[in-house]
Image (cartoon, grey):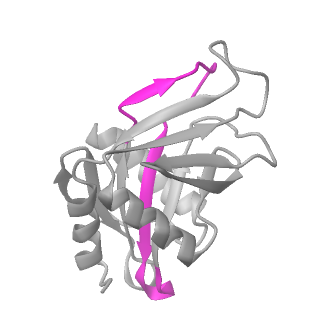
Amino acid sequence: MRAIILACAVGAALAAFAAAPAATADKFLGRFEKWEAHRGGDGNDAYCFIAALPARSEGRIAKRGEATLMIAHFPKRKAFGQVQVKAGFALKKGVKLELAVGAKTFKLSADGDAAYGESAKENGEILAALKGGKTATATGLPATGPPAAGPKVVDTYPLEGFAKALAAIDKECGRK
């Protein structure tokens, strides 16, 4: 699973956050139950991230890529706790992906096959919910046609180890 998350998350971090050039060797910071922590890049291009794969997926879609829930820090840009959900399929334009944690539901802006927290404030609220939650559920609508099992695709992410993984990248990337 490490290779899968690493390939997905590094590619997603670089493409989705659109600021870090090609990374040098990734530093594996550790596995924290269901989450992995990594550091990549050098100098001004350094970043840290944690990522997890869904424990359960509902809804079918042809040729689906890998789904991932990821949090990233970009210390030189002073951008910490950026939330990304990679759906593994093109999301319907104009429709926000829903990320539910406990009683809280967040609407993330979709762009291609990923969705993001829109502001530092929203990302902070999502992180607080994730730290206290047991699972996070991402619900997205595919861009083309309903999947065989219904109009939505739902991925459930385990949060065991989330807080420890986040603490590892906080320390590695200098978040206070």
Relative to 52, 81 lies left or right: right
User: Which residues lie in the magenta part?
Assistant: 53-79
Q: Which quarter of the figure has residue 23?
A: bottom left
Looking at the picture, does residue 39 appear above or below residue 172? above
Q: Residue at x 45, y 44 (%)?
A: 68
Q: Residue at x 18, y 46 (%)?
A: 33
Of 16 and 34, which appears nearest the observer?
A: 34
Image quarter hosting the C terminus: bottom left
Residue 27 visible at all? no
Q: Residue at x 50, y 47 (%)?
A: 100
At which x and y percent is residue 82?
Answer: 49, 68
Of 166 and 3, which appears nearest the observer?
A: 166
At which x and y percent is residue 63?
Answer: 61, 22
Q: Is residue 68 magenta?
A: yes
Q: Is residue 136 magenta?
A: no
Q: Residue at x 19, y 51 (%)?
A: 31
